Amino acid sequence: MDIDNKFLAGPFAPWAEENEAYDLDVEGRIPEDLAGALFRVSSNPRFVPLDLDRYHWWEGDGMVCGIYLREGRAAYRTRWVETDSMRVEVERGEAVYSGFANGGGTPRPLPPGAPPGKNVANTNVGIFDDHLLVYFEGGLPYSMHPETLETYGTYDFHGGVDVLCTAHYKIDPGSGDMLFFAATGPTITWLRAEAKTGAVIDSHSFDITVPVLMHDFAVTANHAVFFVTPAQFRLDHIMAGKPGVVWDEKSLPHGVQIVLLDRRTHTVTWHEVGGHWANTHFYNAYEDNGRLIIDGHRITRLGTPADQLDTPPSSHSWFPPAIPHRWTINLATGTVKEERVSGLAGEFPKINDDYTGRRHRYGYFVTTRGISRDIMSDGLAKHDYLRDTTVVVDGPGPLTSPSEPVFVPRADTIAEDDGYLLTLWWNRETNLTELLIHDAADLIRQPLARVKLPSRVPFGFHGSWADHAVLDHAITQQNQH
Ligand SMILES: [Fe+2]
């Protein structure tokens, strides 16, 4: 493949095999109370993309990696998500669909009955309603067996979601319900799916006037929070072979707006922040004493500028480093205050998910301090919002490019940071991947354990932890089908 495209080279390069291995080599000790599975999904193109220059990281086929931990031992398995669109390409033995981010190539003729667009199923993965679901915001999630990783087909929340939904769902820590949305053009549909049944029990659609690339959002106990920014997702451009991810400042003459949906009344309010920038991901949001606080990362631009659609810049140049920010809305006056939390660039912000919608003290992310050409990230960070301090640790030895940190609380824990941080790192020397387990409360360079995978997991986006009770229940349920 063309190594001029960062997203097809080095640690981003596709890994052509599905793998499994048991009793993995471990340096250090896997904590005995860490029992369950870490699921992550990679962006891993199965066939050579139609346009090598314009191929973007967001367009690779989803390959799920399950790392199963129990009694201090580790096993793992990787399998592609066999979407309907992937099956079309497998039958042809080559790429058929073009890219959507950057206008990547002319699609090959589709056979009768083939999906008109590709569901790359590459963005997030987690267990809900006893299904291991793999998400992509351009289509429905796909369901896989949580142990064999066999793909079953699309999952529509028992008829509650018809076309697509976000990959960035949140789980309500009280009820276990899924809080999420669907974004189609300028229409946002807020959704809540019940933990017990998987059925959608609340929904409300509203118009935000522009087709924002609504990748992530935040929730509080009373509100869902959406940012309206110049980053757009243009299906009409994709159909015309042009870049689908577009930066259009003229569409927002008053700059960025925050839209709040009141979860109790479905009332929608707009709150002006101003300026032209975009969000990548959020840590969390919560309400405190008449204020609504949102923590997330902000970038100066995203996507092909609207006036350069016929000569798009390379994928790498339109995605600058993201900086941690906090937005505070005064719920009485509606005004917004914006603050830069630190100057430390980074991505993939996360919290202890038990604090979703509640006041959190700690945020975890991976740093992008000095991105060299071949890596994704260069350190693991923990920010303390109370003390306004950030700790960053580098990888031990040749390890670099940690993945999004996943926080796993210890059983019967009380302190917010009493748990483990799970990250996948790329070992430059072996060209393989390792799972690192750090003590989140005492974040130091040396992890508690280095779990050595006998393959490389290409860089991907998001994932989650399923504890043994949730995992075992889902496996039992799926085995009965
Ligand atoms: Fe994301």
Image: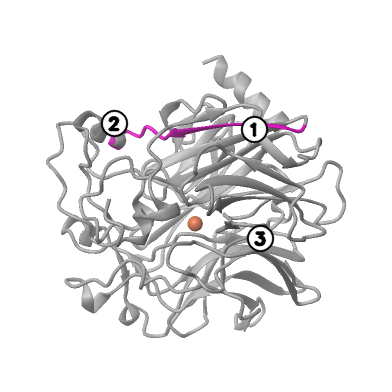
Q: CA distance from mark 3 to mark 2?
A: 42 Å
Q: Amino acid at mark 1?
A: Leu
Q: CA distance from mark 1 to mark 2?
A: 31 Å
Q: Which residue is mark 3?
A: 222
User: Does the magenta run of residues contain 438?
Assistant: no
Residue 1: x %, y % from top left:
27, 50
Taking the spot 22% from the left edge, 79% from the top edge, the residue there is 307
Element marked by disc 2: helix
Left or right: residue 191 compared with residue 69: left
Q: Residue furthest top?
A: 480
Q: Which residues are magenta?
A: 72-85
Q: Are marks 1 and 3 in contact (CB under 8 Å)?
A: no
Q: Amino acid at mark 2?
A: Arg
Residue 284: x %, y % from top left:
64, 62
Nearer-N-terminus badge (1/3): 1
On the question of residue 225 being in view, the answer is no
Up-down relation of residue 46 to residue 250 (above or below): above
Element marked by disc 1: loop
Q: Which residue is mark 1?
A: 24
Nearer-N-terminus badge (3/2): 2
Element marked by disc 3: loop
Q: Which residue is mark 2?
A: 87
Residue 342: x %, y % from top left:
65, 79
User: Does the magenta run of residues contain 84?
Assistant: yes
